[in-house]
Image (cartoon, grey):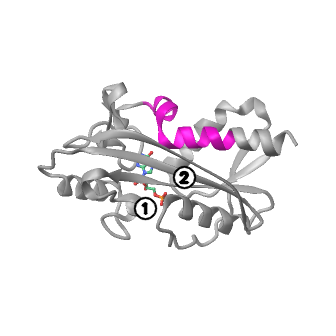
Amino acid sequence: MTIYCATTNPGKFREFGLIFAHYAGEALDVATVPKVPAPEETGTTFAANAALKACYYSRHVDGFVFADDSGLCVDALDGAPGVYSARYAGENANDEDNNALVLRNMAGVENRTARFVCAIAVARAGELVASFEDFVEGRLVDAPRGSHGFGYDPLFHYEPFGATFGETPPERKLLVSHRGKAMEKTICWVLETIVKN
Ligand code: IMP
């Protein structure tokens, strides 16, 4: 069975590819949705935006579509950048701009606890059929470290690894990350509920 992935973010798509490679023997393939204009992400929660994207793209393919909405929540910034993670420094901001703004807003701040959150929604023919969420806790460093990953990975220090996600190979990050854990739940649900029936 093919399940469609509704993301235009190359960093996320690379991670989804690695996750699906683990399930290669399970008759489950991943494909991208056709190029159609992206919907506006108007939700105020990760779950709402994931559902909105999955439902929207599932009107354009024949089959199940999953969408991820994810981001960084910093305690000292009252949960920001949160659902605005991709555009924290402005609509056309890139990862470096967003990271620089987080570091500026965190300059001199002692409490550096933060978490990555990932919500995944599965939809078919415009209807939400399942949703999952997970997170990973870490601390923000003072300057970017490492060139792996994408987004805020170089700022996010994961204590058990003694390294930022930017310094962590992608396969290792996925074992503990918000996306890795939320996708594990999603794939198990797809295999149990859809593929085996
Ligand atoms: P979305 O595409 O609207 O869900 O935006 C997600 C944004 O959150 C990304 O562009 C990154 O800035 C950030 N983000 C989400 N997951 C990760 C991750 O695993 N590592 C680093 N940044 C992430």
Residue drawn at x 32%, y 46% as measured from the top left = 114
Dot 2 beta carbon under 8 Å from ligand 1: no
Residue 76: % across, % down: 24, 53
Q: Quadrant of the C terminus?
A: top right
Q: Earlier in the sequence, mark 1 or mark 2?
A: 1
Q: Position of residue 117 (x, y in %)?
A: 46, 49
The residue indicated by pointer 2 is: 119
Q: Position of residue 97 (x, y in %)?
A: 28, 59
Seen in the image, is 32 located left or right of residue 170? right
Instruction: Please say whether residue 185 is one of the residues in the magenta stretch.
Output: yes
Vertical placement of residue 23 versus 37, above or below: above
Report the amino acid beneath label 2: Ala
Closer to us: 147 or 65: 65
Task: Identify the main secondary structure in magenta.
Answer: helix
Q: Residue at x 11, y 49 (%)?
A: 108
- Image-based side of 32 in relation to 144, left or right: right
Choose top left, top right, bottom left or bottom right for residue 123.
bottom right
Residue at the disc numbered 1: 83
